[in-house]
């Protein structure tokens, strides 16, 4: 399993419920320089689920055409982000009893343990999209590289992400339709974390919540590795929908009011503020109570965060059965990093603190280009970062993903 | 609910109570009753099994057909989620349609706290009912909790549901009863609901004191039933029923109708029915019923069975789609977290009263 050399051109695409963004970068000395960027409104996706494949395909093609045109380079392979509950994760383990007389672990033992973990079949009808490395244990102790160490029982762990076969084929087919290959999938929450959380954060423990328009994805790092990840089908669109139902206004107006007057925390004082829809007090202008807006939005926002908190705890109970795991500052010293379009809502980090009891900050991606330093671009910037940093050491596939795809699609 | 309702209804309306549970039927001594599924449940409830409810209704076909014979308009009130309602409602509705009646159904959806199974069961039934009935009004129980102050007794929130449904029944009955100030022809009412599967609008409001008619109209415009998730907001044909005490003038009544029309449409046709009832005092009541499709003339229906092949009665499948009822999130699989349908606004599920709009 020699890692494939990284191409000098890296294209990534992040298909969200609200917008599709793509980034083309050139790798110079292991760092990406942005060549072109494109963003378009997504059509045909609701709650992270594809409802109109034709429209979505067209949208993806337009975005890819954009980055090719403005950079005058041809894109051959692309990294695709994975988000939403369609991609399910679980922990898989592989064991090996160290056979050597002196009890020293060899590279072959590690490889055997890895292949025994990967031999575990995914549930029927699902295919494996990616493996993410979790701590390797030697006799119950976490070690970063067991080769040469003495022990009896070697255990390797992976976070495996699977997806329903038809769904995966649809996503791959969408990109293949324009003779571009999917080089690899990257978990969206992992990408967002790569752009916004430092290595020190991951070393201690950090929970990254990527709250988009249709879904909220989360990923938990503990002691450098991915501990677990998940997703729920609630996002910013739900807040807009709630507001349009509560105030009997159109979805567009609701979206506008949400951005201008919404808040993730309702304050008693909001009730005394009267706001105007258009502001010109002309014909058709309407006035609303700001308290109604913040109440509706904050209820949904905090409920969504509560769902995330419960989802994290559920996963942790599964991983550490019988232990009373608490989500607190001690376990997650770096607290929560909030990214995605819905992180732009006023008082978002305060709401996270309220619900989870952890410190929280808004994740601004660290990128050369100023226009992309916004929480909603954490995903796409992170894809680029993840593609570079993950590629050589952690290509987790024994044969390489393209080889598997060739078998699947015979091209 | 049926027993509570029957006490408030004018004598022109015949009330029948259908249930599998023999005890609940006995308690309703004043109304006509049909016990469903005597063989299947032996007088007990269905225990939440929709399949059992379905079989129960099918086994009592003959008495149900007798019940609907010669009845022009059937208003079916059912609670979905449990076994009897979810299973039997669609069967009862289709029997009534077969018997030549125009069927308007009020279906209550379970509370979010009742869990995923009941919600799915209720949702499946609404799809069936939407295809069979001429009109379908879905009442979300979650909405009821918002209608009353948080310290109000439980009975008060259910009284809101009773008021909504009985308002509709009184309005429809008045179209037949003599003595209306502005009378409506029963045929006209039927023409609004002539097309099965059209999305139905229903709103109800009550006003009291000075300008009661306008107050009632405004209350109807803000009625939560017309603004629930996925509710219809503009329709082509309207039936507006205004009832008030002796102080109600026709100018007031027409003003109320105009206010309702601005809100809900009714460009193709608006049928007005007004009624003076001395017992109402200074209260005024406005009920609005509407359908989205331009209502064609009600074609004479054949007596038995072959309704489905009648080309003049197209079943508008698109209108019964989930997307019509679930608003923005229609067409996607329902998402349940902790047994709650999270596409329903959070403030509704949590029954939070919102600050008043200025």
Image (cartoon, rainbow, N blue to C red):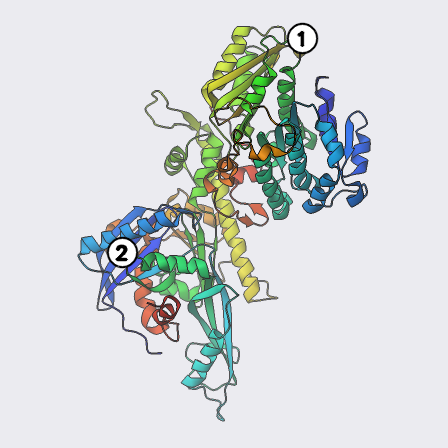
- Say whether residue B146 is visible: no
- Cα separation between marks 1 and 2: 73 Å
Looking at the picture, does residue A281 appear above or below residue A215? Answer: above
Quadrant position of residue B143: top right
Looking at the picture, does residue A171 appear above or below residue B145? Answer: below
Q: Is residue B291 left or right of residue A372?
A: right
Quadrant position of residue B71: top right
Please name the residue shown 49% across and 18% down the image. B269
Q: Are marks 1 and 2 on the same chain?
A: no
Residue designated by label 2: A23
Could you say where residue A388 lies in the image, as x and y percent from the top left?
Answer: 30, 66
Q: Which mark is residue A250?
A: none
Disc 2 crowd rating (10 Å Cα; few below 14, some 14-19, many 20+) is many
Quadrant where the C terminus of chain A lies? bottom left
Looking at the picture, does residue B256 appear above or below residue A288? Answer: above
In the displayed orientation, state which residue is furthest to the bottom: A101
Quadrant where the N terminus of chain A lies? bottom left
Q: Chain of mark 1?
A: B
Number of numbered callouts drawn? 2
| SS under mark 1 | helix
Disc 1 crowd rating (10 Å Cα; few below 14, some 14-19, many 20+) is few
| SS under mark 2 | strand
Q: Is residue A405 left or right of residue B301?
A: left
Q: Chain of mark 2?
A: A
Could you say where residue A241 lies in the image, as x and y percent from the top left?
Answer: 45, 38
- Say whether residue B66 is visible: yes
Residue designated by label 1: B278
Could you say where residue B243 lies in the image, as x and y percent from the top left?
Answer: 61, 13
Could you say where residue B133 lies in the image, as x and y percent from the top left?
Answer: 60, 32
Please name the residue shown 55% across and 50% down the image. B337
- Between B100 and A206, the one nearer to me in the picture: B100
Please name the residue shown 45% across and 84% down the image. A109
């Amino acid at each position: 399993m020699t890692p494939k050399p990284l191409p000098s051109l890296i294209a990534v695409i992040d298909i969200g419920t609200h917008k599709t963004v793509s980034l083309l970068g050139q790798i110079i000395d292991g760092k990406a320089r942005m060549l072109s960027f494109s963003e378009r409104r997504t059509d045909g996706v609701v709650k992270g689920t594809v409802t109109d494949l034709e429209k979505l395909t067209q949208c993806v093609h337009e975005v890819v055409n954009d980055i090719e045109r403005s950079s005058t380079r041809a894109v051959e392979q692309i990294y695709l982000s994975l988000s939403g509950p369609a991609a399910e994760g679980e922990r898989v383990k592989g064991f090996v009893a160290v056979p050597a007389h002196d009890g020293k672990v060899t590279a072959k033992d590690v490889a055997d343990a890895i292949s025994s973990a990967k031999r575990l079949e995914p549930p029927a009808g699902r295919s494996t999209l990616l493996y993410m490395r979790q701590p390797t244990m030697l006799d119950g102790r976490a070690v970063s590289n067991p080769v040469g160490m003495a022990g009896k029982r070697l255990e390797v762990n992976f976070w495996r992400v699977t997806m329903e076969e038809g769904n995966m084929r649809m996503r791959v087919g969408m990109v293949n339709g324009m003779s571009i290959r999917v080089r690899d999938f990257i978990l969206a929450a992992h990408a967002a974390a790569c752009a916004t959380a430092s290595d020190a954060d991951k070393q201690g423990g950090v929970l990254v919540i990527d709250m988009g328009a249709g879904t909220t994805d989360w990923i938990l790092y503990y002691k450098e590795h991915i501990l677990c990840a998940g997703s729920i089908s609630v996002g910013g669109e739900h807040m807009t929908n709630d507001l349009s139902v509560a105030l009997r206004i159109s979805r567009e107006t609701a979206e506008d009011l949400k951005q201008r007057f919404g808040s993730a925390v309702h304050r008693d004082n909001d009730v005394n503020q009267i706001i105007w829809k258009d502001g010109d007090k002309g014909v058709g202008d309407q006035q609303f109570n700001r308290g109604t807006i913040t109440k509706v939005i904050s209820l949904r926002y905090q409920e969504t965060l509560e769902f995330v908190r419960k989802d994290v705890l559920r996963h942790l109970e599964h991983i550490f059965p019988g232990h009373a795991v608490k989500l607190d500052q001690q376990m997650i010293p770096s607290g929560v990093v909030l990214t995605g379009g819905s992180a732009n809502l006023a008082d978002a980090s305060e709401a996270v603190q309220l619900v989870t009891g952890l410190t929280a900050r808004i994740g601004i991606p660290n990128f050369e280009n100023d226009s992309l330093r916004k929480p909603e671009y954490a995903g796409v910037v992170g894809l680029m970062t993840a593609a570079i940093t993950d590629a050589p050491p952690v290509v987790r596939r024994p044969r390489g993903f393209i080889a598997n795809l060739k078998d699947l699609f015979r091209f | 609910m049926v027993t509570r309702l029957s006490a408030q209804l004018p004598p022109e309306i015949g009330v029948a109570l259908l249930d599998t549970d023999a005890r609940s039927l006995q308690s309703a001594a004043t109304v006509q009753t049909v016990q469903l599924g005597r063989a299947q449940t032996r007088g007990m409830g269905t225990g939440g099994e929709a399949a059992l409810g379905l079989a129960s209704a099918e086994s009592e076909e003959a008495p149900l057909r007798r019940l609907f014979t010669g009845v022009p308009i059937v208003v079916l009130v059912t609670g979905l989620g449990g076994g009897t309602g979810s299973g039997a409602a669609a069967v009862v509705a289709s029997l009534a349609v077969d018997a030549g009646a125009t069927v308007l159904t009020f279906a209550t959806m379970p509370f979010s706290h009742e869990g995923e199974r009941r919600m799915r069961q209720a949702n499946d039934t609404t799809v069936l009912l939407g295809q069979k009935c001429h009109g379908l009004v879905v009442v979300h129980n979650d909405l009821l909790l918002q209608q009353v102050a948080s310290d109000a007794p439980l009975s008060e929130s259910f009284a809101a549901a009773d008021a909504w449904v009985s308002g509709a029944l009184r309005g429809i009955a008045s179209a037949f009863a003599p003595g209306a100030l502005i009378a409506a022809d029963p045929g006209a009412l039927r023409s609004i609901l002539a097309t099965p599967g059209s999305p139905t609008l229903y709103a109800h409001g009550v006003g009291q004191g000075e300008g009661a008619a306008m107050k009632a109209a405004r209350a109807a415009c803000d009625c939560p039933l017309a603004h629930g998730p996925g509710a219809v907001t503009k329709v082509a044909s309207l039936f507006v029923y205004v009832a008030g005490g002796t102080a109600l003038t026709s100018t007031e009544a027409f003003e109320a109708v105009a206010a309702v029309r601005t809100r809900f449409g009714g460009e193709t046709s608006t049928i007005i029915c007004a009624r003076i009832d001395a017992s109402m005092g200074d209260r005024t009541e406005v009920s609005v019923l509407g359908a989205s499709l331009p209502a064609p003339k009600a074609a004479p229906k054949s007596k038995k069975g072959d309704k489905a092949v009648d080309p003049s009665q197209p079943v508008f499948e698109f209108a019964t789609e989930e997307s019509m009822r679930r608003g923005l999130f229609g067409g996607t699989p329902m998402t349940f977290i902790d047994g709650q349908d999270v596409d329903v606004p959070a403030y509704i599920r949590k029954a939070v009263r919102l600050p008043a709009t200025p």
